């Protein structure tokens, strides 16, 4: 019981942090970069935004956190979505300390089959993912499964995020 | 570990524990790592049709593949093999933990079909549903494995390390100074390790040994120097040696680059299960599988990429003696 209370408290703190961090770090101030359910056709936001400061990023991505920290990550915000009730995807928004760090994170691990797309300052797309950077933000949207309409749906969601940053 | 006497005491106890640890494969396996000791057995069981046309593996085929792997490993039929697994851990009326791995999210987590297949076979071997406890680091990782929180003792139980809480007292071995979840220290009589094969941006390879990072309170403190010697040191703590009895590694799907997170552009389906008791030998074999795939797609070796999984050799060295990484002393059977 004590544990459950603790979990609720932690959840409340995370949500509060999400509001604070995103509110203070986004150029357009009050606008939440995560599109609400229905804001992008077919997409539903299925849980609350979670925010991890650099020191806590390991809780989300384990050993990957080190690369982000070395590139100057300030915080990472993440939320889950579904498209038309079946295609599940996750949106990660990394707030970096500067432009160099954002470019480094975006370009790490890019393969030759990455398709360049017009999105933010630089964008790439694969069959199941879209990534782009805009200023000091790096956004990565990944679908958990392949689907014929995934590329077009992911691009629509990515454009929705990009407009809100 | 406070002094040399404690070190020798704990090492001695651990070695005694490991003498009986590799019992399932009979004479084909052994924990005595002397030159004349038997080789460690590792079975790779494959079914190229495991995925069929879908993105998720066929549940019945996963169950069949599990049976095939265990039968090959033990030389017994599946029913007797599972009874032997339970008897080996002296866990007939005790809790058996299934340590899954959902850190990479839904796209690259221990498959739900594998977890449920193991749980089904354990129940058929006489283990009560409530004595099967599926766990990982936190609730979200378990969700990624398709598992929901449950403490009802009439059903398979499922909750995370952080919910169960950690021991107040710190455990240490070498550079590993952590607190261990009470699920491992107090709840489970034995653990069946269910890692998923992945590239790891720091460790190079994450599989049988590194899966134990989800058992402790501060895994981030164990990532320095490509996780070496931290992975080996952590697994040398006696409770890990004594309770992690069998590994059924999920190589149904894998990421060969970009891990431990999910990178669908680097996802592939080996359609395999990797079974053994010697986790060092398993990781050595797993390393080879990932290197082969990376070579096929024109990627550099882990050494060239700056993250060779040196912790595997460390785990095999004279100070740790967790198993063997010598290919000549690994009896690799592929079916």
Image (cartoon, rainbow, N blue to C red):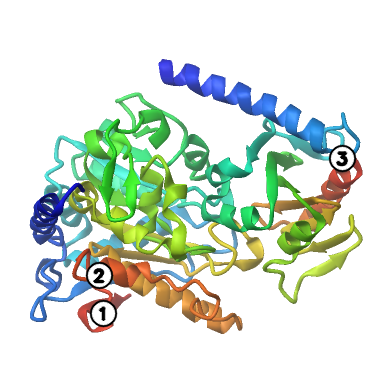
The secondary structure type at the circle numbered 3 is loop
In x, y percent, where is residue A19? 75, 27
Closer to the camera: disc 1 or disc 3? Answer: 1
* Along the viewing direction, whichever of A64 and A118 lies nearer the viewer: A64
Question: Looking at the rendering, which quadrant does residue B154 occupy?
Answer: top left
Give how far apart the Cα atoms at labels 1 and 3 are: 56 Å
Disc on res. B326? 1
Give left or right: position of B331 versus B59.
left
Q: Position of residue B31 (x, y in %)?
A: 13, 66
Residue A3 in the image: above or below residue A35: above
Q: Which residue is mark 3?
A: A41
Q: Secondary structure at mark 2?
A: helix
Q: Position of residue A24 (x, y in %)?
A: 80, 32
Q: Residue furthest front?
A: B3
Is residue B96 visible to us here? yes
Marks 1/2: CA distance? 9 Å
Does residue A148 show up? no
- Label 1 secondary element: loop
Give neighbour class at mark 1: few <14, some 14-19, many 20+ (Cα, 10 Å): some
- Host chain of mark 1: B
Seen in the image, is B236 located left or right of residue B65? left
Numbered circle sitting on residue B316: 2
């Amino acid at each position: 019981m004590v544990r459950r209370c603790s979990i609720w408290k932690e959840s409340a703190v995370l949500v509060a942090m999400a509001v604070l961090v995103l509110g203070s770090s986004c150029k357009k101030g009050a606008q939440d970069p995560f599109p609400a359910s229905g804001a992008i056709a077919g997409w539903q936001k299925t849980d609350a935004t979670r925010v991890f400061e650099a020191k806590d990023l390991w809780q989300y991505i384990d050993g990957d956190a080190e690369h982000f920290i070395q590139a100057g990550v300030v915080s990472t915000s993440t939320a889950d979505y579904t498209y038309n009730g079946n295609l599940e995807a996750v949106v990660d928004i990394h707030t970096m300390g500067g432009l160099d760090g954002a470019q480094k994170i975006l370009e790490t691990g890019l393969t030759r089959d990455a398709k360049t797309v017009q999105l933010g300052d630089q964008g790439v797309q694969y069959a199941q993912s879209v990534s782009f950077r805009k200023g000091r933000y790096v956004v990565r949207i990944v679908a958990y499964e392949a689907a014929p309409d995934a590329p077009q749906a992911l691009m629509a969601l990515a454009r929705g995020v990009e407009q809100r940053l | 570990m406070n002094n040399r006497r404690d070190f020798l005491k704990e090492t001695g106890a651990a070695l005694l524990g490991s003498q009986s640890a590799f019992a399932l494969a009979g004479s084909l396996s052994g924990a005595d790592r002397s030159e004349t000791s038997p080789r460690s057995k590792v079975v790779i069981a494959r079914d190229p049709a495991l995925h069929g046309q879908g993105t998720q593996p066929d549940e019945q085929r996963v169950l069949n593949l599990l049976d095939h792997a265990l039968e090959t490993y033990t030389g017994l039929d599946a029913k007797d093999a599972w009874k032997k697994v339970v008897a080996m851990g002296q866990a007939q009326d005790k809790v058996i933990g299934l340590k899954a791995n959902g850190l990479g999210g839904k796209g690259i987590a221990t498959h739900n079909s594998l977890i449920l297949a193991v749980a089904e076979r354990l129940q058929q071997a006489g283990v009560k549903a409530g004595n099967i406890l599926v766990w990982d680091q936190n609730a979200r990782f378990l969700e990624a494995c398709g598992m929901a929180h449950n403490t009802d003792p009439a059903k398979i139980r499922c909750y995370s390390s952080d919910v169960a809480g950690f021991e107040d007292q710190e455990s240490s071995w070498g550079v590993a100074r952590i607190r261990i979840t009470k699920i491992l220290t107090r709840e489970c009589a034995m653990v069946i390790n269910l890692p998923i094969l992945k590239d790891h941006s720091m460790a190079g390879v994450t599989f049988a040994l590194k899966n134990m990072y989800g058992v402790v309170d501060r895994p981030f403190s164990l990532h320095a120097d490509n996780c070496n010697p931290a992975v080996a040191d952590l697994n040398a703590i006696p409770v890990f040696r004594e309770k992690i009895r069998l590994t059924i590694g999920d190589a149904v799907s894998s990421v060969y680059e970009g891990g431990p997170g999910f990178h669908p552009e680097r996802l592939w389906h080996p359609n395999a299960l990797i079974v053994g008791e010697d986790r060092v030998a398993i990781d050595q074999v797993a390393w080879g599988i990932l290197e082969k795939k990376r070579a096929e797609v024109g990627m550099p070796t882990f050494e060239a990429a700056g993250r060779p999984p040196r912790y595997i050799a460390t785990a095999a060295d004279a100070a740790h003696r967790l198993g063997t990484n010598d290919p000549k002393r690994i009896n690799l059977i592929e079916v």
